[in-house]
Amino acid sequence: MLNEFPCDVISIKPLTESIAQLCVKPQTVFTYESGQYIEVVHGDQNAYLSIANAPHDNQLDFHLFHAADNAKAQALLQLAQQKKQWIIKGPYGTCTANHLNNRKPVIFLARGTGFAPIKAVIETLLAQPASMPMYLYWSVKTKAELYLLNVIEAWQKQHKQFHFSPIFTEETGSHIPPSVILKQHPDLSNYQVYVSGPKPLVMTAYHDFSSQGLQREWFFSDVFSLDR
C-alpha cells in the first residue's frame, strides 16, 4: 500500500476561468519522475492528477480543471483554498521521460490539461545536454485555452529542436486531431509518440499512428498503463 503524503498548498493561480495552477509542497521528500501522476485523498472525492513540473525543490504543480459541473475538482479546489493542505498518494504511471529514446524524434499530443504531464516531460528533456527533435501538438478549442503559451514560446526561442503547433478544434470541427499530425508526419516508423488526454483521443491516435508505421513500444499513454 502506498504511503500518504501531507502537502502544504503554496499557491493557487488562475490560468483560465476554469483551470487553476496549484503548487503544493510535500511535508516530507516525495520522489517521482516526469510524466507521473498522483491521487489526491479526500473522502469519496479522491481524484487523479498529473504532475505538471519536472522534479525541483520538492514542489509539485498541478493544472486543475474545475468547471462548475466537475464536482470532484470543485471539492479539491475548495480543500486547497480553505484548509491549505492536500494529502496525496503515489506516484503512479510508467510513461515517464526516462522511458523515451533520445535517438528518436518524439511527437507530443495533448488535449486540454493533458498538457500537464507533457510539460513535465519536456522540461526534463530540454534540461539534458542533447535531446531529440520534439514536436508538441496541443488541442484546444480556442487560443485563449493555451494557458501557458508564454512557457512554450520561451522553449521555442531557446531550443531549436523544439517545435509547437496548436490545434484549434473550433476551427477544425473535430476533437480528434491525429489527422492534422499525419499531414506533417506521414511516416511514423522512426518516431515515438506521447499522448495525454481523454481515452477516445488516445485510442484514435494509437489506431491512426499505428497504421502509419508507429511501433507499439514507442506509443506512450497512461490510458495504456496497467498500474492505474
Image (cartoon, helix red, strand yellow):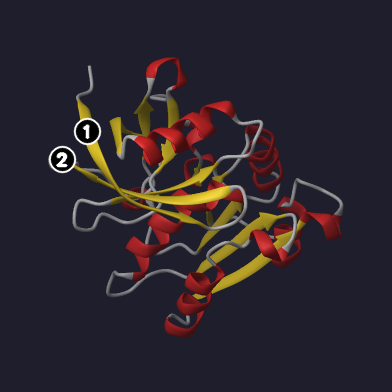
Residue 179 as seen in the image, left or right of residue 138: right
Question: Does dot 2 land on a helix, a strand or a loop?
Answer: loop
The quarter of the rendered structure image containing the C terminus is top left
Residue type beneath disc 1: Pro
Q: Residue at x 59, y 53 (%)?
A: 109
Q: Residue at x 51, y 40 (%)?
A: 221
Q: Position of residue 158 (x, y in %)?
A: 42, 83
User: Would you call the spot at circle 2 few (<14 residues within 10 Å), some (14-19), or many (20 or more)?
Assistant: few
- Residue ID for mark 2: 27
Q: Residue at x 83, y 56 (%)?
A: 170
Q: Is the residue 134 above or below the residue 158 in the image?
A: above
- The answer to which of 159 and 15 lies nearer the viewer is 15
Which dot marks residue 138? none
Does the residue at mark 1 contact the one at mark 2 (Cβ under 8 Å)?
yes
- The CA distance from mark 1 to mark 2 is 6 Å
Question: Does dot 1 land on a helix, a strand or a loop?
Answer: strand
- Residue ID for mark 1: 6
Q: Position of residue 179 (x, y in %)?
A: 77, 54
Residue 118 as seen in the image, left or right of residue 125: right
Q: Is the residue 70 above or below the residue 103 in the image?
A: above
The quarter of the rendered structure image containing the N terminus is top left
